[in-house]
Amino acid sequence: MTDAEFDLLDELYFVTPFRILLERTGLPAAELQAQLSSLLEQGLVRYYWPDPDTELAYEPTSFGALGRDASYLASKEGLLQHNTR
């Protein structure tokens, strides 16, 4: 896990919209989306759209269109890795 991924997981203990993550992390939107995609591929994060209760299965082809409108939450595995680092 990279330092950027660790810092991002730190923000995902609760369901958090992309726009809030932009504000809190200070990352450019494209970089934030790339980091989230990486975490989703690793199974460390889950994402929700169109509301915070509807979880989507990660598919790289649809993530690009939905990623900036979605909300995110660290998975159990993500929390374990975050807390044991």
Image (cartoon, rainbow, N blue to C red):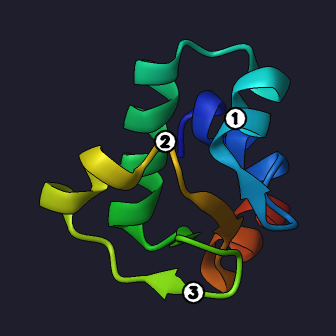
Going from N to C along the chain, the mark reached first, 1 or 2, is 1
* N-term mark: 3 or 1: 1
**At label 2, which amino acid type do we have?**
Arg
Q: For the residues labelled 1 and 2, say whether their Cβ atoms are less than 8 Å apart.
A: yes
Q: CA distance from mark 2 to mark 3?
A: 15 Å
Would residue 62 be found to the left or right of residue 52 on screen? left
Task: Residue under label 3, please give it.
Answer: 54
Q: Which mark is residue 68?
A: 2
Q: Position of residue 81 (x, y in %)?
A: 68, 66
Q: Quadrant of residue 27?
A: top right
Q: Label 1: which residue? A: 19
Q: Is residue 85 visible?
A: no
**Residue 44 vs residue 36, the one in the foreground:** 36
Q: Of the two numbered discs 2 and 3 on the same chain, state the one appearing first in sequence.
A: 3
| Residue 49 position in % (x across, y down) | 52, 70
Image coords of residue 12 (percent x, y): 78, 57
How far is the residue under mark 3 from the one under mark 1?
Answer: 18 Å
Residue 30 horizontal/vertical position (percent): 40, 21
26 up-or-down from 71: above or below: above
Let me know if residue 56 appears in the view: yes
Closer to the camera, 38 or 33? Answer: 33
Disc 3 packing (10 Å; few <14; some 14–19; many ≥20):
few
Q: Is residue 3 left or right of residue 65?
A: right
Q: Residue placed farthest to the left in the image? A: 61
Identify which amino acid the numbered label 1 is placed on. Answer: Arg
Q: Residue at left 21%, top 60%?
A: 62
